[in-house]
């Protein structure tokens, strides 16, 4: 009997430890995640659901760091992103359109292709609505068409540094660096207008229906 218990109890502990826990219950200390009960660095799977029970995210940690595949979904059940981590370092990132089409982050030209509008700007230590209205930035291969009066700009992409270089008649004009991917339709960028001026802007992908603008895509 004792021998049987010695075999069964470790198996029960293994099964119990492998059960995913709610992502929001983890405790963050110094950039690492700890188990809420054992207080030890967490290794294992996590999940988070929307109100109503639909999955929001699934992922895993190893020694308190994100490790492996992390998947997020929109509240309508469509997959939003697949992010791959190794020891806390983000690797290959794939994002999905609202139609379910995959767009790899490794190809910035493909990701940005289409029309975007700036909606908010970070100023005075807070987010404010973007002052200029009716600005539409259309990325079309190696061209950027801006509808606020500026000419069409030539652009080049740097996938590794997440940046877009804008030129006007061969002269460097602006540099845009993508800092945060909130999703397929929502990004935060730094726009370097000069060596001393940097604008932090939230941009939303525009949605088109029957060839006409149909407002911003909502996630």
Image (spheres, rainbow, N blue to C red):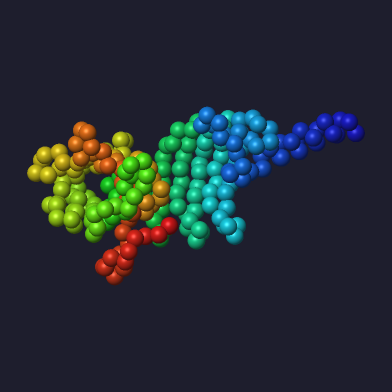
8 left or right of 127 in image: right
77 left or right of 198 in image: right
Residue 169: % across, % down = 9, 44
Q: Residue visible at 30% across and 64% down? A: 208
Asked whether residue 64 appears in the rendered view, the answer is yes
Quarter the N terminus occupies: top right
Residue 106: % across, % down = 34, 42
Quarter the C terminus occupies: bottom left
Residue at the farthest right position: 1
Along the line of sight, which residue is nearer the eye, 104 or 206?
A: 206
Q: Residue visible at 82% across and 31% down? A: 6
Does 69 appear above or below 143? Answer: above
Q: Residue visible at 50% across and 47% down? A: 71
Does 122 appear above or below 132? Answer: above
Along the line of sight, which residue is nearer the eye, 4 or 177?
A: 177
Number of numbered discs overlaid on the protein picture: 0
Along the line of sight, which residue is nearer the eye, 181 or 92?
A: 181
Residue 40: % across, % down = 64, 30
Residue 111: % across, % down = 32, 49
């Amino acid at each position: 009997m004792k021998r049987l218990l010695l075999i069964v109890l470790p198996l029960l502990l293994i099964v119990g430890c492998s059960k995913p826990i709610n992502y929001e219950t983890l405790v963050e200390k110094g950039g690492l995640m700890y188990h809420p009960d054992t207080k030890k660095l967490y290794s294992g799977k996590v999940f988070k659901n929307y109100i109503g029970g639909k999955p929001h995210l699934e992922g895993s940690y190893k020694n308190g760091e994100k490790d492996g595949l992390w998947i997020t979904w929109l509240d309508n059940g469509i997959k939003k992103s697949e992010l791959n981590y190794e020891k806390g370092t983000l690797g290959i990132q794939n994002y999905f359109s609202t139609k379910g089409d995959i767009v790899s982050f490794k190809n910035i030209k493909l990701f940005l292709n289409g029309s975007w509008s700036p909606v908010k700007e970070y100023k005075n230590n807070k987010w404010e609505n973007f002052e200029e209205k009716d600005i539409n930035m259309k990325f079309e291969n190696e061209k950027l068409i801006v509808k606020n009066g500026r000419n069409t700009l030539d652009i080049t992409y740097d996938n590794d540094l997440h940046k877009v270089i804008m030129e006007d008649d061969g002269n460097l004009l602006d540099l845009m660096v993508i800092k945060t991917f909130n999703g397929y339709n929502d990004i935060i960028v730094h726009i370097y207008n000069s060596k001393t001026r940097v604008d932090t802007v939230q941009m939303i992908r525009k949605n088109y229906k029957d060839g006409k603008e149909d407002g911003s895509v909502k996630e």
